């Protein structure tokens, strides 16, 4: 550490540039991870709020909630500790100049997927809904009448709840009757038993038995099968993994060039009897310090940027993930330094001192 | 027991089908308190002799004994450890680390070897070498003569029994060159070390107890 630290102190500009590059790479990694996390939440935060173990859909729906439709009595709660009925319908809600894609959830107020109301009051009549509070940022407020696309029905916002997005759309929670009204219109009464799914809690999903026409999937599997969810996550995760490799390669190249420039210095030190181990540890310590500084500054920069981002940018920083990515960045950077270690071991002190 | 002994040592370099004997069969003994000069023209084998004596290269034949330890029988790791403990190099190219101050050059040696000169011995050495005022200077801030004096201080700091100096007065004017030789002589006599100075500068031989001449790889005692 002595050699590494003093070299950095004495060559501030050179090492500041290396730290700068690592800062930018780590900034990008942290930001992408925040974006991945934010987009993930956009898709599933309403589902996460259920704290459910599984969901029952029709077998032919291909684990796609809007495509699933069955009668309430097709499942009797066998094997589940708690069940909740769910009707779901997508639409576009308009109130004055405000317009938003929404997912309408028809639920029963006394079942466990009923969200907490953070503003206003709960729905009590058909046509009343609790809305995700992200709609407030778009200008919606309690008391707004919402016109729905392609249906002659109007909903009224009576309250708001937080963290309730499904497939990137804010959720409107209402009664099952509200759902049936907006989905079936005049035919609502004829379809009053139809729902999209049962959401279940159970000690183990293996205990549940459902009809052949239905299928039970775990909540995680349900999330992963949302349209575009896995593809989007894989893309961003792949970009993060590539950045790990980029970071290792960049640092390896910088350190290798620095090591090559110092061959004669290392050679002289080896001639004096300073061991390969001491010199290698010095390069590894230097890499560790550079990566650590880069990651810390990148982290700070990311948090700072997060403070100034508009609410529309779906970034959600998960500090555990960020700490893990920071550790990986440091580790891969140190691995990149092994090229330089190999070079140091191969230095012949005799050649280095011109013998 | 001599501090340094070369027994029937030679060095042959192969270049394609031809062979060049850079150092012919050599016997050499250096005792404690001796300042020895090895003189000869460029390409005569001086550096080959010095680097074999310092364990930086292996001879083709023969044994190299440092304080009774045969370097030839040691692996590189132990050879490096013996170099650190027993040998101080004053190299033709400055052996200073450019990003360390004069004081930090010594601290670096503290990091890799514990029983170096004590604080008062170190200060005495700084005074005798006239570098006490330069402790916070970097090598780039020093003149050629100052750098060479710091290099000698570095070689002496680990309290080695043998000092191997390769052209220690190169690039120094006469006054500075004689000053450096005075310092090496004092260090040798006061601390009963062996110092071997390899040089082509014949002005230095008056300082030495023995003078060897090397011509075409053949080492001979001159005086």
Image (tube, rainbow, N blue to C red):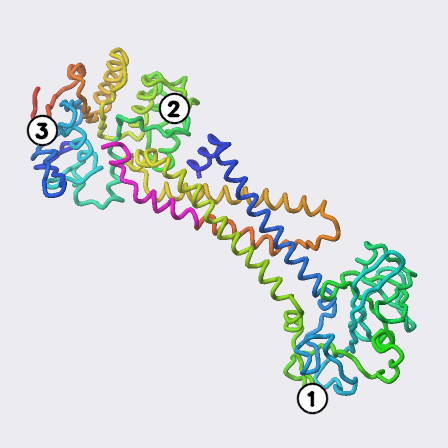
Q: Position of residue B140 (x, y in %)?
A: 40, 23
- As measured in the structure, the alpha-carbon distance from the residue carrying label 2 to the one carrying label 3 is 36 Å
Placement of A236 over or under A280, stated as above or below: below
Q: In the rendered image, which residue does mark 3 sit on? A: B216
Labels 2 and 3: the sequence-earlier one: 2
Q: Nearer the viewer, residue B35 or A158?
A: A158
Placement of B27 over or under A185, stated as above or below: above
Q: Nearer the viewer, residue A167 or B82?
A: A167
Q: Quadrant of residue A341?
A: top left
Q: Which residues are magenta?
A: A336-355
Name the quarter where the N terminus of chain A is drawn.
Answer: top left
Left or right: where does residue A277 sit relative to residue A30? left
Which label number is shown at residue B139?
Answer: 2
Q: Residue at x 11, y 39 (%)?
A: B12
Whether callout 1 and callout 3 share a subunit is answered no
Q: Residue at x 59, y 47 (%)?
A: A27
Residue at the extreme front: A150
- As measured in the structure, the alpha-carbon distance from the residue carrying label 1 to the one carrying label 3 is 100 Å
Name the quarter where the C terminus of chain A is drawn.
Answer: top left
Q: Secondary structure at mark 2?
A: helix
Q: Position of residue A330 (x, y in %)?
A: 50, 49
Q: In the rendered image, which residue does mark 1 sit on? A: A211
């Amino acid at each position: 550490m002595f050699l590494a630290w003093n070299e950095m102190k004495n060559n501030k500009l050179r090492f500041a540039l290396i730290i700068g590059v690592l800062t930018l790479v780590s900034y990008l990694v942290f930001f992408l991870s925040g974006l991945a996390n934010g987009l993930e939440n956009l898709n599933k935060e309403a589902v996460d709020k259920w704290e459910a173990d599984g969901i029952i859909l029709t077998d032919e729906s291909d684990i796609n909630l809007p495509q699933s439709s069955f009668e309430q009595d097709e499942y009797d709660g066998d094997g589940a500790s708690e069940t909740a009925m769910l009707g779901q319908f997508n639409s576009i809600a308009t109130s004055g100049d405000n317009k938003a894609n929404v997912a309408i959830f028809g639920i029963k107020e006394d079942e466990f997927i009923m969200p907490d109301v953070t503003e206003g009051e709960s729905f009590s009549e058909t046509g009343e809904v609790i809305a995700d509070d992200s709609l407030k940022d778009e200008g919606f407020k309690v008391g707004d009448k919402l016109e729905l696309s392609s249906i002659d029905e109007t909903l009224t916002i009576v309250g708001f709840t937080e963290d309730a997005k499904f497939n990137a759309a804010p959720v409107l929670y209402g009664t099952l009757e509200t759902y049936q009204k907006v989905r079936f219109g005049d035919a609502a009464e004829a379809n009053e038993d139809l729902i999209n799914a049962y959401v279940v809690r159970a000690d183990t999903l293996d205990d549940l038995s459902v009809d052949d026409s239905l299928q039970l999937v775990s909540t995680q599997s349900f999330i992963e099968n949302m349209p575009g969810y896995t593809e989007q996550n894989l893309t961003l995760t792949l970009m993060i993994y590539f950045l790990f490799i980029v970071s290792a390669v960049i640092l390896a190249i910088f350190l290798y060039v620095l090591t090559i420039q110092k061959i004669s210095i290392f050679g002289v030190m080896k001639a004096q009897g300073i061991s390969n181990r001491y010199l290698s540890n010095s390069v590894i310590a230097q890499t560790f310090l550079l990566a650590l500084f880069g990651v810390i500054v990148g982290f700070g920069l990311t948090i700072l940027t997060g403070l100034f981002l508009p609410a529309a940018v779906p970034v959600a920083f998960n500090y555990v993930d960020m700490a893990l990515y920071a550790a990986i960045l440091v580790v891969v950077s140190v691995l990149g330094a092994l090229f330089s270690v190999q070079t140091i071991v191969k230095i012949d002190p005799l050649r280095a001192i011109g013998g | 027991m001599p501090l340094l002994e070369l027994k029937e040592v030679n060095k042959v370099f192969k270049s394609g089908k031809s062979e060049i004997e850079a150092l012919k069969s050599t016997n050499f003994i250096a005792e404690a308190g001796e300042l020895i000069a090895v003189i000869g023209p460029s390409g005569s084998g001086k550096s080959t002799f010095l680097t074999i004596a310092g364990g930086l290269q292996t001879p083709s034949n023969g044994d190299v004994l440092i304080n009774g330890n045969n370097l030839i029988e040691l692996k590189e790791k132990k050879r490096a450890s013996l170099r650190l403990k027993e040998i101080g190099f004053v190299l033709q190219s400055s052996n200073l680390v450019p990003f360390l101050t004069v004081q930090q050059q010594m601290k670096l040696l503290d990091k890799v070897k514990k029983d170096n000169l004590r604080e008062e011995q170190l200060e005495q050495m700084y005074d005798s070498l006239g570098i006490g005022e330069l402790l916070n200077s970097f090598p780039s801030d020093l003149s050629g003569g100052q750098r060479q004096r710091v290099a000698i201080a570095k070689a002496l700091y680990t309290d080695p029994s043998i000092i191997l100096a390769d052209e220690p007065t190169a690039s120094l004017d006469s006054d500075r060159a004689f000053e450096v030789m005075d310092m090496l002589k004092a260090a040798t006599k006061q601390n009963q070390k062996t110092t071997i100075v390899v040089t082509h500068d014949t002005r230095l031989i008056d300082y030495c107890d023995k003078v060897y001449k090397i011509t075409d790889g053949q080492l001979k005692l001159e005086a």
